[in-house]
Amino acid sequence: MEHKRKLVTKNDPKSPISEQYRTIRTNIQFSSVDEEIRTIMVTSSGPGEGKSTTTANLAVVFAQQGKRVLLVDADLRKPTVHYTFNLMNTSGLTSVLTNQMTLMESVKAIDMKNLFILPSGPIPPNPSELLGSKAMDYFMKAALEEFDIILFDTPPVLAVTDAQILSNKCQGTILVAGSGKAEKDQLVKTKELLVAAQGKLLGVVLNNKKMKESQHYYYYGTN
């Protein structure tokens, strides 16, 4: 079973794409003057726009900077983070939220300094309720005591309400738009839903933009 995604920032840190991820990291750090952004949610308007790959590579570049990073798979309906890092998904976020395991019992260390992974765990029947629960608030507090940066991979905004719920709990949200795939009206609707949920949209990553040299290119700009 081979679902491993490209971790270009880990496998080829000197590539132009890796540099673009570092630019996104810098922009995130400069996006708030009065408070350090430590909880960040990454989402998209629809499926297949590259949010999980973007989340994983952002987690890597933050860890490369020396930050103690926790990448959380909060897509409790269609989790993929464990594939990216070749991990088992027998326990994870849902195990913590249902008090079956503690946070640190569920966190997985990988072969990279400073980066830790929390898979989704078993798929629950009630993802939205779990993410909106007080247990999730306790989880956020506990995670912030252990890690410098917490990145959440979430479902697409227009598919289910999970991302809206989590955006309200995170300090910032990054929206990934697949080049040639994301429709303008869908992006506008996504922004409206995130704003309605009182989420703070940090910016948009245009993913998979083809350049003249046929290389992938990533752009980060303000909304």
Image: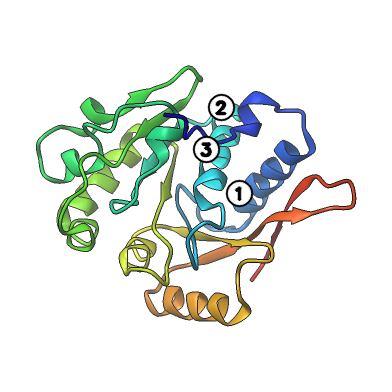
User: In this orientation, does residue 17 appear?
Assistant: yes
Marks 3 and 2 sit apart, C-alpha to C-alpha, by 11 Å
Above or below residue 85? Residue 44 is below
Q: Name the element at disc 3.
A: helix
Comparing 170 with 16, the one in front is 16
Q: Quadrant of residue 170?
A: bottom left
Label total for image: 3
First in sequence, mark 3 or 1: give its number.
Answer: 1
Residue 27 in percent (x, y) is at: 66, 52
Residue under label 3: 59
Q: Image quadrant for the C terminus? A: bottom right
Say which residue label 2 marks.
66
Where is residue 22 shown, x and y percent of the image? Answer: 68, 41
Residue neighbourhood size for the residue with mark 1, other residues' Cα within 10 Å, grouped as few (<14), some (14–19), many (≥20): some
Residue under label 1: 29
Secondary structure of the residue carrying numbered label 1 = helix
| Amino acid type shown at disc 1 | Gln
- Residue at the extreme right of the image, as rendered: 212
* Mark toward the start of the polypeptide (2 vs 1): 1
